[in-house]
Image (cartoon, helix red, strand yellow):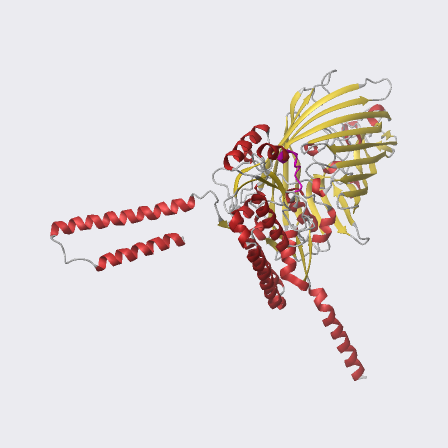
């Protein structure tokens, strides 16, 4: 800009100096010619100034004082998409729920933004071939509550254990551990309700207490029908709590230990014959456990070396319930038939997994997981699984994974070798997941 | 009785006054050690400062550890480099801290990049096919001493806004910092003259501001695109470029593996120069002025 002004000023000076030497008025035709020359000079001046402006704009090092103006003037939310593709190359046939060999397991669309000075909004919508479209998560989070509190309202991943808080496509393995799939749900446990958390450090290390109250325990089983809603009373809601403790062991290593529990009613099929369309009663289910995580990542070699060791133990208890079901009756069937006694027996299952992952190059990781549980799908008999993973990250925004699993159900059931490939990619500014 | 009461009240008031400076200290947390050192220089004993990243750490990939949340939850000021340098971890920490003062829009939310004339603002369509591109400009701006002065000025303005009583102290500290920087610049003036225009190769675009200040000419980067590790084809082309331009120095940070740089250096007769990118990156650079002095001198010695 200074250059332009300087050039213009210089030219004006020259023009003035030349003008001071102007001769007496020329004859008329010469005046017209002089006028044309003056106009041409002006045009030349303008062209020279434009060329100077272009030269400044075309510098390879474009400079500007700070980001100019608002970077998001239309106040659009952050929009991101995550695609999760799974190929099942298991030799004995596909082990996927829908039986496919190759499938888009999920596409997740996220919208995230500040709603106003008081709340942040996050919406995650999932698309998949098997289940169509669904609201995976949609919640408001407070921005400025006092006393280190945070309140979340809506649908969210429940703080039950460690890996349940991670979106499936972001796992270090292709699928959730078996204790999560069996005790919480095939795609983990989400809840719709309220979550309150508080951070504190009275003992000098990070602690966070998370408590939730949500509508129900997991998704409603499609084939089960109760005579009344499982959360007819407020006591029928599902409640959870988790106390997270975190320590820095050094700059490179840290350790996390948490205890958690979730309890709520869930539809459970009773053994007796269905009464009308009723084949289930509300039964209290409680899952409790501990999770621990050890991480090592040397700061000066963080791009190339890291290690994580993670384990979770869960205990699932279903209470015993006996109820008298009243058979609906209209005037036509009076007197009303006697109630039918139905029952669900108590059961307890437990299980655990241990997972570790080591970074071998900047973009390549080796992982392994061992699962062990008393499996409700096999009447409480022991199921084991051993799996290995090779992860390659072309960038932060794409992940390729090859997995082998040896699935070992109780004796008498078929053992399986599973070979899975996964490709995951992210478009847009998908925010990082919790540490 | 009344005199005793007056004495007690006066004592309490005196105690409160003595305690006030400690309580009135601004709590400043910065993302990098460079911002930390400049904040300390300007703030002096009127602030207590901590930093999240370490000088020998890649600032793009800091883990959002819960212990950092404890630092942030009582901070009065959160100063960060901006331009998405901290995009991978800052949102988690700010959300976790639940401190409205340091969230976007809060009085203590300080995006330092707003005070900096930026290099490498992309033109045209920007997407990730261009690598780990920073759409708003190159964030590694602290390696130019003029920008160090701008950062100091920004901190002086912010600290004065939040602590008006310290205005004169902050101004004096800023002047002292600028004078210390100017004295150091006079010391390396001759070296700058000798290395002007000399060709060098850099690992990442993080050295652009230092190159802009020293007027060395970066003829190529080890990374084909920002954040993308070198491929054999790219290295072959870079070797040709180095031979053609006479570039004899490869500048890189200590947190990258030097095997590939050594490979290129062996085939071009170049030297691999490991420079700390931030304060505390090595023991030789305990503060901002020392960082710039060290890097300028090392670069000059290498390219001469």
* B2 relative to B298 in the view: left or right: right
Q: Main secondary structure of the magenta part?
A: loop
Residue B115 seen: no
The image shows residue A383 at horizontal and vertical percentages of 84, 25
Number of on-image labels: 0
Query: Which residue reaches farthest top?
Result: A92
The image shows residue A369 at horizontal and vertical percentages of 79, 29
* A423 relative to A405 in the view: left or right: left
Q: Is residue A97 above or below residue A4?
A: above
Residue A25 seen: yes
* B116 relative to A392 in the view: left or right: left
Q: Which residue does the image show at 76% across and 36% down from the upper left?
A: A307
**Stretch of the chain drawn in magenta:** B254-261
Q: Which residue does the image show at 54% across and 46% down from the upper left?
A: B211
Q: Check the picture and name the quadrant holding the C terminus of chain A.
A: top right
Q: Is residue A361 above or below residue A36?
A: above
């Amino acid at each position: 800009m200074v250059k332009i002004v300087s050039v213009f000023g210089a030219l004006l000076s020259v023009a003035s100096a030349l003008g001071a030497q102007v001769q007496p008025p020329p004859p008329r035709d010469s005046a017209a010619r002089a006028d044309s020359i003056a106009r041409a000079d002006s045009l030349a001046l303008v062209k020279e100034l434009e060329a100077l402006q272009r030269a400044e704009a075309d510098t390879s090092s474009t400079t500007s004082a700070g980001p100019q103006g608002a970077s998001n003037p239309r106040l659009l939310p952050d929009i991101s998409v995550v695609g999760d593709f799974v190929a099942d190359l298991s030799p004995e046939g596909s082990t996927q729920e829908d039986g496919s060999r190759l499938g888009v397991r999920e596409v997740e669309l996220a919208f995230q933004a500040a709603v106003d000075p008081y709340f942040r909004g996050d919406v995650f919508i999932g698309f998949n071939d098997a289940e169509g479209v669904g609201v995976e998560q949609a919640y408001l989070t407070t921005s400025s509550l006092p006393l280190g509190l945070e309140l979340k309202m809506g649908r969210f991943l429940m703080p039950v254990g460690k890996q349940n808080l991670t979106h499936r496509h972001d796992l270090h393995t292709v699928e959730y551990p078996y204790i999560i799939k069996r005790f919480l749900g095939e795609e983990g446990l989400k809840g719709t309700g309220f979550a309150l958390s508080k951070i504190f450090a009275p003992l000098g290390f990070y602690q966070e207490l998370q408590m939730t109250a949500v509508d129900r325990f997991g998704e409603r089983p499609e084939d089960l029908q109760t005579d009344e809603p499982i959360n007819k009373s407020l006591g029928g809601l599902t409640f959870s709590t988790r106390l997270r403790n975190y320590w820095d062991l050094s700059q490179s290593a840290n350790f996390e230990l948490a205890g958690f529990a979730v309890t709520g009613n869930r539809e459970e099929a009773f053994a007796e014959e269905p009464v009308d369309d009723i084949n289930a009663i509300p039964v209290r289910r409680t899952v409790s456990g501990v999770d621990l995580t050890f991480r090592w990542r040397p700061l000066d070699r963080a791009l190339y070396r890291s290690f994580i060791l993670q384990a979770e133990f869960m205990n699932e208890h279903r209470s015993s319930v006996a109820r008298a079901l009243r058979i609906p009756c209209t005037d036509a069937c009076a007197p009303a038939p006697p109630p039918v006694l139905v029952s669900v027996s108590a059961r307890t299952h437990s299980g655990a997994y241990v997972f570790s992952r080591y970074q071998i190059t900047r973009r390549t990781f080796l992982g392994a997981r061992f699962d062990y549980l008393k499996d409700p799908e096999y009447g409480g008999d022991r199921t084991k699984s051993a799996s290995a993973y090779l992860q390659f990250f072309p960038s932060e925004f794409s992940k390729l994974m090859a997995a082998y699993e040896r699935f070992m159900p109780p004796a008498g059931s078929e053992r399986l070798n599973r070979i899975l490939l996964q490709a995951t990619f992210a478009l847009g500014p998908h925010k990082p997941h919790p540490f | 009785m009344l005199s005793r009461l007056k004495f007690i009240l006066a004592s309490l008031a005196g105690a409160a006054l003595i305690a006030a400076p400690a309580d009135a200290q601004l709590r400043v947390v910065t993302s990098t050690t460079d911002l930390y050192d400049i904040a300390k220089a300007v703030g002096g004993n009127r602030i207590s400062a901590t930093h999240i990243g370490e000088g020998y750490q890649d600032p793009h990939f800091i883990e959002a550890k819960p212990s950092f949340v404890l630092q942030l939850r009582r901070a009065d000021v959160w100063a960060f480099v901006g331009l998405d340098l901290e995009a991978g971890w800052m949102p988690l920490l700010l959300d976790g801290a639940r401190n409205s003062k340091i969230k976007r829009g809060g009085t203590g939310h300080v995006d330092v990049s707003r005070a900096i004339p930026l290099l490498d603002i992309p033109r045209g369509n920007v997407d990730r096919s261009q690598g780990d591109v920073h759409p708003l400009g190159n964030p590694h701006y602290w390696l130019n001493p003029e920008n160090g002065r701008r950062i100091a000025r920004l901190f002086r303005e912010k600290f004065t806004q939040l602590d008006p009583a310290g205005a004169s102290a902050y101004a004096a500290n800023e002047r002292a910092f600028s004078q210390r920087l100017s004295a150091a610049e006079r010391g390396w003036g001759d070296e700058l003259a000798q290395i002007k225009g000399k060709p060098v190769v850099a690992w990442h675009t993080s050295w652009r501001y230092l190159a802009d200040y020293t007027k060395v000419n970066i003829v190529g980067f080890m990374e084909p695109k920002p954040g993308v590790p070198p491929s054999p084809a790219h290295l072959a082309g870079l070797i040709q470029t180095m031979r053609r331009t006479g570039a004899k120095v490869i500048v890189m940070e200590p947190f990258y593996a030097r095997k590939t740089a050594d490979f290129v250096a062996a085939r071009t007769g170049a030297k691999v120069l490991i420079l700390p990118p931030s304060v505390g990156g090595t023991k030789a650079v305990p503060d901002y002025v020392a960082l710039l002095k060290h890097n300028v001198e090392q670069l000059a010695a290498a390219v001469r």
